Image: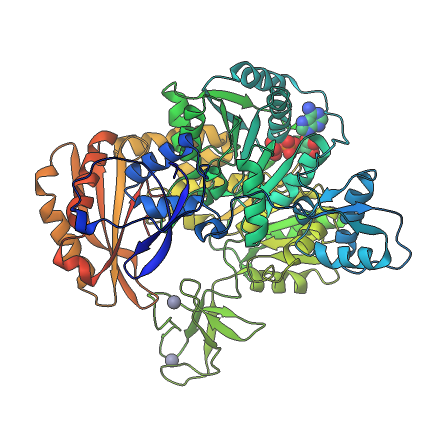
Amino acid sequence: MVVGGRVSVPFGRRQVVAVVTGITQTTDVPSNKLRNVLSVLDHEPVIPEDLLSLLLWASRYYHHPIGEVLASALPVLLRRAAAADVPQIECYRWLREPLQPVSGRAHVQKALIERLAGAEGQPVDAGSLSGLSRQWRKSLQSLLNDGAVERQDLDALPKNIATEQPPVLMNEQAQAVAKVRGALGKFQSFLLDGVTGSGKTEVYLQCIDAVLARGEQVLVLVPEISLTPQLMTRFQRRVSGCLVSLHSGLNDTERLQNWMIAAKGHADVVIGTRSAVLVPMPRLGLVVVDEEHDGSLKQQDGFRYHARDFALMRAQKNTCPIVLGSATPSFESLNNVAAGRFEALPLSVRAGGAQPPKLALLDIRRQPLFEGLSEPLLQAMDKHLSEGRQALVFINRRGFAPTLLCNDCGASATCLRCDAHMTVHAKSRRLRCHHCGAERPMPNQCESCSSEALDFIGYGTERISQALQERFPGVSMARIDRDTTRKKGALEAQLSAATSGEAQLLVGTQMLAKGHHFPGVTLVGILDADRGLFGTDFRSLEHMGQLVLQVAGRAGREAVQGEVLIQTRNPDNPMLQTLVRDGYAAFAEAALTERKVAMLPPYAFVALVRAEATDPVAPHQFLERVVAELGNWQGPDLMTMGPAAAPMERLGGRYRAQLLIHAERRARLNACLKDLTGFIDELPEARRTRWSIDVDPVDLF
Ligand code: ADP
Ligand code: ZN
Ligand code: ZN
């Protein structure tokens, strides 16, 4: 038995897989309560000592049970009793040009053939092929049938060979690379604060080269699964070494394989989404967190860790530098720069001489609107389209309209299980709740009074695309949101149409905002920025600013300067004006001043205790009891606020309440939560609710 290795143990009447966290000769547990280990599964740790101690720390920091923390760190197959070996690696080798037509989508075929034929007779692993497209197997099968390709499995992951030379770095890029290279072998945190298109990825790539030359591994975290294939292909062109990706698109076997390759130290670069931060890497020499401001780096249920914060702890533990990159850094990171904990590496100009986009507010008060679109915006679109360029319209709501309202009685269609309106989906003629997933057919009559005078209130991507199609007949369009990209391969197809310029008009939600490079887009229209100004959450404003600038960053990334038009009914709002006129840094400074005055994070520390139950009063009773028990903790430096109903009280048929704990010092918050976890389970009220603790919550819902 080894610490960090798995054992099979009895648990009640069941038999479960457990991880050994320590070995001791003595215990206070009475001997009749002790049980024997049934079998030892690993003779070497699956979780090495350094990572294990971080996971133990995280369990204390997030006040989450260690068992679940360890389970989150293991691939599903290792949570069961699968062997912790690197399996044979599924690989394919190019033999000759295909004789028959290849099936599958054209861009998938092209990418696949390029990759296999480009390997010059060397086998290419399935993992890196799967990064090309989720539909790669279909085209591969037809290449196999044709005899153009053969399968050849290997014991170790083949090395990727770079095919592209690095460009000459611009001044600021070169300085950033020099700083990070200078810090290799030491713990240091950098904030790569670079405007959209300033060449942050290029900086990562050139730092990575130096790390690989030292024989060390690099961990690259990205927020979105849709961004991993893009980044992976770019890395494959540039990095010589073993590259693996870890994201939710892998099946259990692929995930175990890539995890083992990273954990055994065979992988040189691991690119992954959030949970990749929990993967063992014995030679870790650099951590990169791209789009570090992105909310999806925070796990929102179960073990609610923040991948950026965990990554910082890992870099410290492994004595290596960490680079957090963003065009719109989180307020936490800006505060860390101000406090001297992070070093800022600014990239202030766009690569390739592209100009920053020009932002302007469009006052739409008392303006005639065509389906929510103002005349100046439509005219600007017309102009850009007729000059042969692309336009992008951003609205962060999917579906046709967020509300179906009766003109006779005023009733709106609501979800039966949530305090929410049902969203109208016109094409499928259904009403859907975007919070719990409930759906029903769209009624022809009011559900309350049977009147047929029903109105669609508000706009979603479906309605906006329909309106634009009407206004610009003959213009090709791509709509990118969760509904249009649900099918396998649909997202890649839409993104590739957007990138190639085949789709002239793009309409989408925040899926369009993140990290993509659409060379032909020169106009961006933002329809609903106002919502972020009045959000219920203290982070709403920060998120609005980040989203607006990220979307804006899609405009004019090449020769022609981009134009960004933001429709608003609050053109005099000082925050919106600062954002548009003076940019993100000025906006963040102003917003941070407000946070400081209000004593909100990052100037204070908060945790949220959430409770939910089918009974509306149980969560409140429970949290009130918690407040009473915490009586002695309350004082000038620690306050509890609530309990209060959650902003959306009823969700999926359950009532939700929450309690905010606010402290001036981290240590005090942590001590209070430790006390709380000691008694909370024992409260009789706890039996009637489901509760959780969220430390450093990213939203208060
Ligand atoms: P970011 O990650 O900041 O959005 P990228 O690294 O994707 O920026 O760079 C934007 C574009 O500029 C890419 O097409 C990239 O190849 C190009 N680029 C980056 N750095 C340079 C450079 N030093 N010289 C020429 N082109 C560059
Ligand atoms: Zn009615
Ligand atoms: Zn619902």
Could you say where residue 216 lies in the image, as x and y percent from the top left? 57, 24
Q: Is residue 149 visible?
A: yes
The percent position of residue 357, horizontal first and vertical second, equals 61, 35
Q: Nearer the viewer, residue 89 or 400?
A: 89
Scheme by which the image is coloured:
rainbow
Residue 665 can be seen in this image: no
Q: Does residue 289 lie above or below 682 as drawn?
A: above
Q: Position of residue 240 (x, y in %)?
A: 70, 29
Describe residue 443's horizontal placement relative to residue 693 as left or right. Answer: right
Residues 150 and 685: in front is: 150
Front-lying residue, 216 or 45: 45
Residue 469 in picture, x, y percent from top left: 67, 63
- Name the quarter showing ligand 3: bottom left
Task: Determine the residue located farthest toward the bottom in the rendered image.
Answer: 450
Residue 402, above or below 33: below
Which of the 4 image quarters holds residue 278?
top left
Q: Residue furthest right?
A: 99
